[in-house]
Image: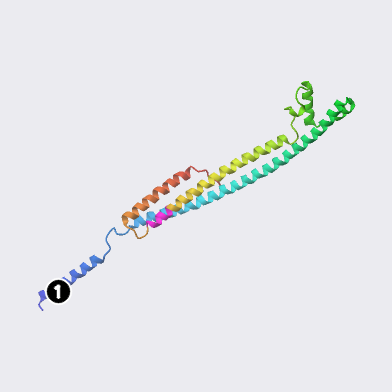
Amino acid sequence: MTVGDETSTLSAGAGGRATVEESTAPARGAHPSEAHELVAVILLSLVAMLTAWCGFQASKWGGDSSVAFSEASASRIEASGFESEARDARGLDLAVYAQWVEAEVNSNETLADYIEARFTPEFAAAFSAWEADGRLENGPFTREEYIPAGTEESAAALADAEASFQRALDFNEKGDNYSLITVLFALVLFLAAIAQRGISVLGSRIVLIVAGVLALGGVVLLLTFPIRF
C-alpha cells in the first residue's frame, strides 16, 4: 500500500467519524435553554411563595369570620334574654293595670291610688302621658312613652348581632377571594412545571408565557386585597 492510499484511508475514516458525531449530536434549539429553565424556576419559586401567602391570608380572614359569627350568635342570645325581660315586664304592667281598672270601675279611689303608686317607672311615664291627653287612646300601653325594661337593650343587642353578622360575611368573602387566587396560582405552578418537561421549545415557551401572564394577573388582583396580620 502506497503512502497516497494510506492518506486516503485515514481521510475517509475521519470523515466517517465526523459524520456519525454530527448525526448523533443534539440539534441546537431542540431543548429549552438555560435561561429558559431559569425563568421557569424563578416563576415556580415566586408563585409558590405567593400561594403560601394567600393560604395564610385566607386562614386569618377565615378566623376573623368565625369570631364575628360567634359574636353575632352571642348578641342574638343576649337580645333574646332582654326581649324575654321586656315581655315579662309588659305582662306585669298589664296585670297591675287590670287591677287599677277594676278599682276605677268600682269607684274605689283609695285602692286605685294605691295601685297607681306601684306602677313601674316605665309604665308610670306612659300612664301619666295618657291621663294628660284626657285618656283618649286605648290605654297607656299604646303610648310611645311606654318602653318596658329590656326593650331598648334588646334592640341594641339585635343591632350588634346584625353588625357582627355583616362583618362575618365580609371577612368570609375576603378569605374566599384569597382562596380563589390560590387556585389561580396552583394553575400557574402546573403550567410552569409542564414547561420544563419533554415538549418542544416553542411549546414550552408558549406555556411559560401563559403561566407568566396568569401569574401577573394574580399579582395585580392580590394587590387590591386587604391584608390581615
Q: Position of residue 193 (x, y in %)?
A: 40, 57
Does dot 1 land on a helix, a strand or a loop? helix
- Identify the image quadrant of residue 77: top right
Q: Mark 1, residues whose alpha carbon is within 10 Å: few (<14), some, or many (≥20)?
A: few
Q: Magenta residues, as a range? A: 188-195
Q: Position of residue 146 (x, y in %)?
A: 75, 29
Colour scheme employed for the rendering of this structure: rainbow
93 lies left or right of 6:
right
What residue is disc 1 on? 9
Q: Residue at x 68, y 36 (%)?
A: 156
In the image, residue 24 above or below residue 153:
below
* One can see residue 193 in this view: yes
Q: Residue at x 77, y 24 (%)?
A: 130
Q: Residue at x 42, y 55 (%)?
A: 190
Q: Residue furthest bottom?
A: 1
Q: Position of residue 119 (x, y in %)?
A: 82, 31
Does the magenta segment cover residue 193? yes
Callout 1 amino acid: Thr
Number of numbered discs on residues: 1
31 lies left or right of 176:
left
* One can see residue 46 in this view: no
Taking depth in this image into account, of 111 and 218 the one nearest to the observer is 111
- Identify the image quadrant of residue 220: top left
Q: Residue at x 75, y 37 (%)?
A: 87
Does the magenta segment cover residue 81? no
Q: Quadrant of the N terminus?
A: bottom left
Q: Position of residue 22 (x, y in %)?
A: 23, 65
13 lies left or right of 106:
left
Taking depth in this image into account, of 176 and 189 the one nearest to the observer is 176
Q: Main secondary structure of the magenta part?
A: helix
